[in-house]
């Protein structure tokens, strides 16, 4: 496996691979890899392309009171994992390499970033779209993989690629969960044993809510209340949001009569977890 922290060196490698006719696939990440990331990498490998994994904890997407400083990092462990997965190139730039001077140019995806995590983390998605644009320009992938655990991020990146005519295919990968339902996340490492147990209410209540919808429950507010009540009853988690939204454009939903996203963010102590489920609704046309 090749590895570099240097943009010019990476460009040279990519140029050579492209000249050899290789398709380039990118899996962007912030590292501290788990089975969720490894599933994205597996999907990337299945394409048969030259697979690049980037590891960069992007300061631009963290608010001043968020966990940038304590975000878990272990580059050497990650490097070993991606090598075992057959990744071709690991790109792990420093902050100075990505942001040699203060940025004055940003990429912003309006509307989609005003709700859910965007409303709770002002500036977060501007930081994500800006760094992902930079990564796309640096690596110039043909295909890029994103996880649907970060569903809003996935939609925003898709929309950015479409709006800006970037020649990149964005592929989404369903949420990878622990056996007991907890969505894998690098931040799970911060949970105490008790919080880890309590956090199961997230996936459990999402599943139960989806079942209520499949059985005909149509009120989005009732579904949100159902989940909020379960979280407050079964845990000490502090709710950032629990919302039912249109799964395509994140617009508000009152009556559930189309495909919806149920998304939530809940804090367990200082650790903020997100989870979601997309529910198909049969329409009798
Ligand atoms: N459980 C998961 N299932 C599917 N994809 C995932 C999962 N966890 C992370 N990903 C995806 O991996 C990519 C890199 O995510 P990132 O490095 O931020 O990991 P993370 O575990 O989501 O971190 P955190 O939860 O701390 O934000 C993103 O596209 C993200 O959606
Ligand atoms: C896409 C991403 C790598 C941008 O920093 C990050 O938001 C993530 O890991 O989901
Ligand atoms: N996977 C989302 C990255 C973040 O929480 O900043």
Image: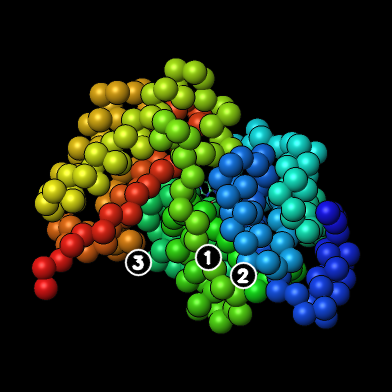
- Tally the numbered discs: 3
Residue located at (30% from left, 30% from top): 231
- Figure quadrant of residue 20: bottom right
Disc 2 element: strand
Would you call the spot at circle 1 few (<14 residues within 10 Å), some (14-19), or many (20 or more)? some
Q: Earlier in the sequence, mark 2 or mark 1?
A: 2
In the image, taking residue 194 as reference, residue 83 lies left or right, namely right
Residue located at (73% from left, 42% from top): 81
User: x, y percentage for residue 148?
Assistant: 46, 54
Disc 1 element: strand
* Residue underneath mark 2: 143
Residue 226 appears anywhere in the view: yes
* Residue underneath mark 3: 249
**Tag nearer the camera, 3 or 2:** 2
User: x, y percentage for residue 7?
Assistant: 83, 63
Q: Earlier in the sequence, mark 3 or mark 1?
A: 1
On the rendered image, what quadrant is the C terminus found in? bottom left
Residue located at (18% from left, 51% from top): 214
């Amino acid at each position: 496996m090749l590895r570099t922290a240097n943009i010019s060196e990476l460009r040279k490698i990519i140029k050579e691979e492209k000249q050899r006719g290789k398709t380039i696939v990118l899996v962007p990440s912030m590292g501290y890899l788990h089975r969720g990331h490894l599933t994205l990498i597996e999907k990337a490998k299945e394409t048969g392309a030259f697979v690049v994994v980037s590891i960069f904890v992007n300061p631009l997407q963290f608010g001043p009171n968020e966990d940038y400083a304590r975000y878990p990092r272990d580059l050497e462990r990650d490097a070993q994992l991606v090598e075992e997965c057959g990744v071709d190139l690991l790109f792990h730039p420093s902050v100075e390499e990505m942001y040699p001077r203060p940025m004055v140019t940003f990429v912003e995806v309006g509307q989609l970033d005003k709700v859910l995590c965007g409303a709770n983390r002002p500036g977060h998605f501007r930081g994500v779209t800006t760094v992902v644009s930079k990564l796309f320009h640096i690596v110039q992938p043909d295909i890029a993989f994103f996880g649907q655990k970060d569903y809003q991020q996935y939609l925003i990146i898709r929309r950015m690629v479409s709006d800006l005519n970037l020649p990149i295919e964005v592929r989404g990968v369903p949420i990878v969960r622990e056996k007991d339902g907890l969505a894998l996340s690098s931040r799970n490492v911060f949970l105490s044993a008790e919080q880890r147990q309590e956090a199961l209410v997230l996936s459990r209540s999402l599943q139960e809510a989806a079942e209520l919808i499949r059985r005909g429950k149509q009120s989005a507010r009732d579904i949100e209340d159902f989940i909020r009540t379960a979280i407050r009853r079964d845990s000490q988690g502090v709710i950032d949001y629990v919302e039912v939204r249109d799964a395509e454009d994140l617009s508000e939903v009152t009556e559930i009569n189309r495909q919806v996203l149920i998304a939530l963010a809940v804090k367990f102590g200082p650790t903020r977890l997100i989870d979601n489920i997309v529910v198909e609704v049969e329409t009798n046309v």
